[in-house]
Image (tube, coloured by chain):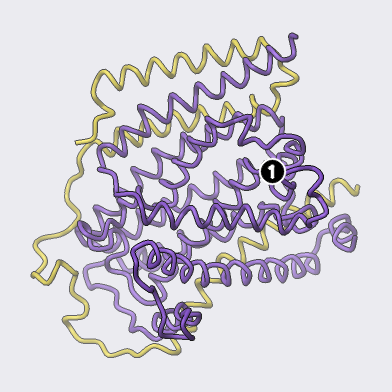
Chain colours: A purple, B yellow
Amino acid sequence: MMMQELLASQPGPVNFLIFFIQAVALLLIVLGFVTYVILAERKVLGFMQSRYGPNRVGGRLGLLQTFADILKLLVKEDTIPDKADKKLFILAPGFAIVPAVMVLAVLPFTEHFHFADIGIGLLYYFGIAGITTLGLLLGGWASNNKYSLLGGARAAAQMVSYEIPLVMSVLGIVLLTGSMNLIDIVEAQEKVWFVFTQPIAFIVFSIAAYAELNRVPFDLPESENELVAGFQTEYGGFRWAMFYLAEYIYAFAMSALAVVLFFGGWQPLFPFLDFIPGAVWFGLKFAILVFGLSWVRATWPRVRPDHLMEFAWKVLLPVALANIFLTAIAKELIQLF
Amino acid sequence: MDVLHIYQNNYLIVLAFLLLGILLPVVALFLARLLRPHKPSKAKYTTYESGNEPIDDARVQFNVRYYMFALMFVIFDIETVFLYPWAVAYDKLGIFALIEMLIFVFMLLVGLIYAWKKKVLKWI
């Protein structure tokens, strides 16, 4: 209620300060999530490979492992290679992290817990997220290192190629909803989730999302056994942590976006289950998708670069395009009868 | 008036996130600067190349493939920019807009098929 009044009031510095504090609160939640999802991922990977995973720092479960890692990064000496382009080298992690924080603004978590409720939510997400590519390419170029350059170029080629199927796959949803506002999209799924009405879109979206996140099986930009660490080879300490953080914030944002677009956001699985609060539903769906990220990482081998690029242009793009027109024609036919 | 304020405030939230995004790396790197050691030595600032002396500059000439994919990206990204408003307004536009969009996409598809036949999509 208070939020409604605040939104209706004259915009000014006080409003901005309140919004900023709210944004900080969300960022702290996301950072907490990132800290524990890294641990959870290492634990899941350990479990799937019949080993323990982190189990020394913070009890048997290694609950403080990530904090120890952050502390290590914090006190690490900062080295910028002499041959590197210093200004760009310093700027590149910023280009990766700023868009990652910005996309959080439009994600609706529950009916009442959301931030910017803007009409172009979906387009905003993809438009801003695309800027991160520039950060990776810039980092690779500025390092003046062969591995970095190859990794950065690969990252750029891969991310621009997969951005198109990613953006096109969700057009079917925009067609069905008639809106790009993410809250409207969730509300349109009250009866049926879009994963059932748009199954092709969901498949294309998931594949392209894994590629956009640079996750296994599409982790070619950093492929550690051929390119050392790809575009981030020369980075260390907190500069490197910014790249890593951006990657995991995107894992958070993309999973949340998938829940919003395909799994009905905070809507319950069946209408009679709506006594369970929306936040629990959202969290549950979200947790399953995040677990999926680790699961895929443990089971799939990395694809070859040429297969990767050809797959985006020769398979995903035509399929995504076909899906748009299939949806439009289906919509016309339903109206006809 | 209220509607306008709600609209403006929502974009103010976006600005708040932008400021937060800029402050995050700045504050984090400033903190790290206070805590981290600084013991420079010449070897630390050489470029990494698996322990060998780096040979030449890393900035070599590129395979033109990257350029072709960038061009393809620009074409299809603009296409999506056209597709989005079309999808939003589809209910009002009706079947005529569908046919128009089919023609538009068909022309771009011809371009894709041409690139495919010219083996531009093959990554070497």
- Neighbor class of circle 1 (other Cα within 10 Å; few <14, some 14-19, many 20+) is many
Above or below, A302 against A42 in this view is: above
Along the viewing direction, whichever of B56 and B84 lies nearer the viewer:
B84
Q: Is residue B39 left or right of residue A238?
A: left
Q: Residue at x 85, y 61 (%)?
A: A3
Image quadrant holding the C terminus of chain A, namely top right
Left or right of B117 in this view: B90: right
Residue that lies at the very extreme toward the front in this rendered image: A50
The location of residue A35, given as percent across then percent down, is 51, 72
User: Label 1: which residue?
Assistant: A264
Q: Please name the amino acid that badge 1 sits on.
A: Gly
Q: Is residue A185 left or right of residue B7?
A: left
For the point 56% across and 70% down, the residue is A31
User: Residue B13 appears in which quarter of the rendering?
Assistant: bottom right
Percent coordinates x, y for residue A175 in the rendering: 66, 27
Compared with residue B83, is residue B100 higher up or lower down, i.e. above or below? above
The local secondary structure at tag 1 comes to loop
Say left or right for B79 vs B69: right
- Could you say which is closer to the camera, residue A54 or residue A35? A54
Measured as percent of width and height from the top left, residue A112 is found at 80, 56
